[in-house]
Image (cartoon, rainbow, N blue to C red):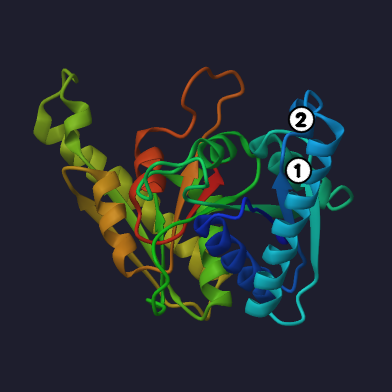
Amino acid sequence: MSEGPMVVGTDGSDGAAGAVLWAAQEAALRNQPLHIVCAVDLDLAERLSADTRRRVREAAGALLAEAAATASGGAPGLTVTTEVGREPAADALLRAAVSAVPHAEDAAVTIVVGSRGLGGFSALLLGSVGLTVAGRAGCPVVVVRGTRRPSGGVVVVGVRDEGDRGAVSFAGRTARRRKASLRLLSAWTYFQYFETMAPMPDVVRRNMEAKAAASTRLLGSVREEFPDLEVSEEVVRVPSPAGELVAASRHADLVVVGVRRPAHHVGRTLGRVTHAVVQHAHCPVAVVPRS
């Protein structure tokens, strides 16, 4: 599947400005347009006076103009479009992503969100809009975290099994565009197997062998797909897989994790590891649907 346009949300916050800049530069690398959405929930605003609604729309337009200028400044020549969303922010971004590629089934849009908007109380935690989008989207979602710093020259992708093939391919394409290396990291812990009736040494050995086999198969696949890409793999047993990925994010340009979204699920949909990574990583995190 090819990678299509970028859709990014803005609310005028510093986190949104960073997301817009990241999305603009990534869109330019893809040779794809950028669509910026500012959601003001105008349906709710119908309860307000006509003058207040007008001022809300004008404020949203001003934020979009500022965001478009940021995007154009960071990626000159980029095609940028803007939209005032009438729905709540998460709904507006998800709808815009579907609308961005209505006739291109072989292309996938990517949604970009900041780590915390104006409604946030801590720069460390991902806001409700970002969590909702990352948990519901059927396309890749990038959460722009961390402070801007020199490129680390590496993209890290978390690998559990062959269901992460889509995440690995996404990471490989990103690394190739950025002329970075790709690191496949399979981190696991045997604490999750404490309730098993099998002897612990056998459980550890079998799990290690399964993780190594899956990682090796994916390594072969990615080397075939990206023959000119520098690729490495690592299978490690650690107290916390999420902690290992967060630690790896200190020296990465992007961390990519896969997420499985059950058709009928109530509550948190990201899973413990993915949830922890998008909350605490030191660099942008891409959440990619698992096959």
Report x, y in % for residue 62. 74, 58
Q: Which residue is mark 2?
A: 45
**Mark 1 nearby-residue class (10 Å; few <14, some 14–19, many ≥20):** some
Residue nearest the observer in this picture, 252 or 94: 94
Provide residue 257's location: percent of width, then percent of height. 45, 49
Q: Residue at x 53, y 63 (%)?
A: 18
Q: Badges 2 and 1: C-beta atoms under 8 Å apart?
A: yes
Q: Is residue 41 above or below residue 241?
A: above
Circle 1: residue type: Val
Q: Secondary structure at mark 1?
A: helix
- In-front residue for pair 53/274: 53
The spot of residue 137 in percent (x, y) is: 63, 39
Q: Is residue 233 above or below residue 122?
A: below
**Residue type for callout 2:** Ala
Q: Which mark is residue 261?
A: none
Q: Nearer the viewer, residue 150 or 216?
A: 150
Q: For the residues marked 2 and 1, what is the alpha-carbon distance in whole angstroms?
A: 9 Å
Residue 224 falls in which quadrant of the image?
bottom right
Q: Is residue 102 left or right of residue 194?
A: right
Residue 95 in the image, given as x and y percentages of width and height: 76, 39
Q: At 83% across and 46% down in the image, what residue appears?
A: 99
Q: Which residue is mark 1?
A: 56
- What kind of element bears circle 2? helix
